[in-house]
C-alpha cells in the first residue's frame, strides 16, 4: 500500500478545502511547538510545515529551549487558544523529562487540537463520533479504504495501546464493525494472536522486535507503523521482503503510514478551521 500516493490524494482534497475556506474569509493557520532540540522531532516538524505550505495552509513554529518551564509552555498555549487567527495547535511529543504531557494536552482547546489527543476528542471517538482524530490511525483507515480492504467482519490485531495509535485505531476499527484485539508487552503468545489477524497493525518501534513471515496470516493486510533506526537506516516492525510474500497487502517503511500521518494532520487543520467558523466540510 503506497502511502505517498494516497497522501497525495488527501493533500489534493485539502488544497480544495483551503480555497473554500478562503472564500469564507479564513486562511487556515497551524501553529506547532517544539520544546528542546530532539533531532527527530525537528525533522518531523519540518516535514509538517513543508506539507502545510504545499496545500496553502499558513503555519508557524515556536521552538522553546529544553529548560522552559511547564507554566511558560502553558502560557503560550493560552495565548494561542485565544488568538482567533490560530486554527490548529500541535505540541510535538515527546516533551523533555519533567513536563506533564497530559496537562499540556488538556491545555489546548479541543477544537484546535489537531493531534486529536484532548480527552474530549478521545471521548467523542470512543463514543463513536469521529471528529478530530489522531493522524496516524486516521491515516491507517484511509489506506484501508483506498485499497478497498474489507474491515467489517474482519479480525484486526493491533500491537500498540498508546493514546496516539493503538487506542484510537481500535475505536476507528470498531466503528467500522471489525473485531479488534489490542496487544502489548504483557500479551502472552503474541505470535498466536498475530496469525489470526485479517488486518495486522504493528506500532512497536523497537530494534529487537520484528514481525516475520511465520507471524502473519496468508493474504492478510499488514500495516507497519513502527519506526526505528538500525545501522543508520530507517526500519519498521515488519520484515518487509519476507512478509510481502505472504501478505495480501503491506505498507513499506518509509513511504507507508508516515506520509498519511502528515496528510491527516493537514486534513485535521481544515476540519478545525471549519468547526471554528461553523462551516461543514
Image (cartoon, rainbow, N blue to C red):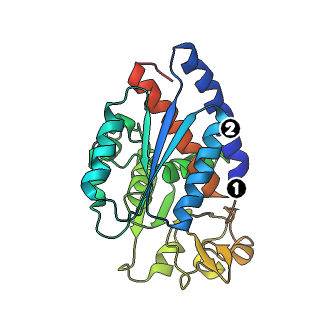
Residue for badge 2: 54
Tell me if residue 216 comes above or below residue 19 in the rendering.
Answer: below
Q: Is residue 239 left or right of residue 34?
A: right
Between marks 2 and 1, how big is the CA–CA gap?
Answer: 23 Å
Instruction: Decide: few, some or many residues near mark 2? Use Cα within 10 Å; few <14, some 14-19, many ≥20.
Output: few
Label 1 sits on a secondary structure element that is loop
Q: Position of residue 89 (x, y in %)?
A: 42, 42
Residue 234: image x %, image y %?
66, 72
Does the rendering let one see residue 144?
A: no
Nearest to N terminus: mark 2 or mark 1: 1
Please tell me the numbered disc located at residue 1.
1
Q: Residue 203, percent across and down? A: 51, 67
- One can see residue 49 in this view: yes
Q: Quadrant of the N terminus?
A: bottom right
Secondary structure beneath dot 2 equals helix
Question: To which quarter of the image does residue 88 belong?
Answer: top left
Q: In the picture shown, does residue 95 fall above or below 128?
A: below
Say above or below: 149 vs 194: above
Residue nearest the observer in this picture, 209 or 194: 209
Q: Position of residue 161 (x, y in %)?
A: 38, 65
Classify residue 209 as left or right of residue 149.
Answer: left
Residue for point 50% across, 20% down? 26
Observer-nearest of 48 and 115? 48
Q: Is residue 216 left or right of residue 181?
A: right
Residue beneath the point at 62% across and 52% down = 47
Residue 271's disc is none
| Label 2–label 1 contact, CB within 8 A | no
Number of other residues with Cα within 10 Å of mark 1, as a class: few under 14, some 14 to 19, many 20 or more:
many
The residue nearer to you, when weighing 204 against 24, is 24
- Residue beneath the point at 72% across and 78% down: 242
Amino acid at each position: 500500500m503506497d502511502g505517498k500516493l494516497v497522501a497525495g490524494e488527501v493533500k489534493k482534497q485539502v488544497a480544495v478545502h483551503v480555497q473554500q475556506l478562503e472564500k469564507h474569509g479564513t486562511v487556515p493557520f497551524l501553529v506547532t511547538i517544539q520544546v528542546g532540540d530532539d533531532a527527530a522531532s525537528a525533522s518531523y516538524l519540518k516535514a509538517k510545515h513543508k506539507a502545510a505550505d504545499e496545500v496553502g495552509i499558513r503555519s508557524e513554529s515556536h521552538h522553546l529551549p529544553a529548560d522552559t518551564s511547564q507554566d511558560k509552555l502553558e502560557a503560550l498555549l493560552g495565548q494561542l487558544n485565544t488568538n482567533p487567527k490560530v486554527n490548529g495547535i500541535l505540541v510535538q511529543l515527546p516533551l523533555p523529562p519533567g513536563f506533564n504531557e497530559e496537562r499540556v494536552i488538556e491545555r489546548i482547546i479541543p477544537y484546535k487540537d489537531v493531534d486529536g489527543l484532548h480527552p474530549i476528542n478521545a471521548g467523542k471517538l470512543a463514543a463513536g463520533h469521529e471528529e478530530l482524530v489522531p493522524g496516524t490511525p486516521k491515516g491507517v483507515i484511509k489506506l484501508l479504504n483506498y485499497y478497498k480492504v474489507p474491515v467489517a467482519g474482519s479480525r484486526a490485531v493491533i500491537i500498540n495501546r498508546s493514546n496516539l495509535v493503538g487506542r484510537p485505531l481500535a475505536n476507528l476499527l470498531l466503528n467500522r464493525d471489525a473485531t479488534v484485539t489490542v496487544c502489548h508487552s504483557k500479551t502472552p503468545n503474541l505470535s498466536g494472536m498475530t496469525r489470526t489477524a485479517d488486518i495486522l497493525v504493528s506500532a512497536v518501534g523497537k530494534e529487537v522486535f520484528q514481525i516475520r513471515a511465520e507471524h502473519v496470516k496468508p493474504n492478510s493486510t499488514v500495516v507497519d507503523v513502527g519506526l526505528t533506526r538500525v545501522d543508520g537506516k530507517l526500519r519498521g516492525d515488519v520484515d518487509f521482503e519476507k512478509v510481502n510474500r505472504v501478505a495480501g497487502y503491506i505498507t513499506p517503511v518509509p513511504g507507508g503510514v508516515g506520509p498519511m500521518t502528515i496528510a491527516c494532520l493537514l486534513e485535521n487543520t481544515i476540519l478545525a478551521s471549519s468547526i471554528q467558523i461553523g462551516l461543514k466540510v
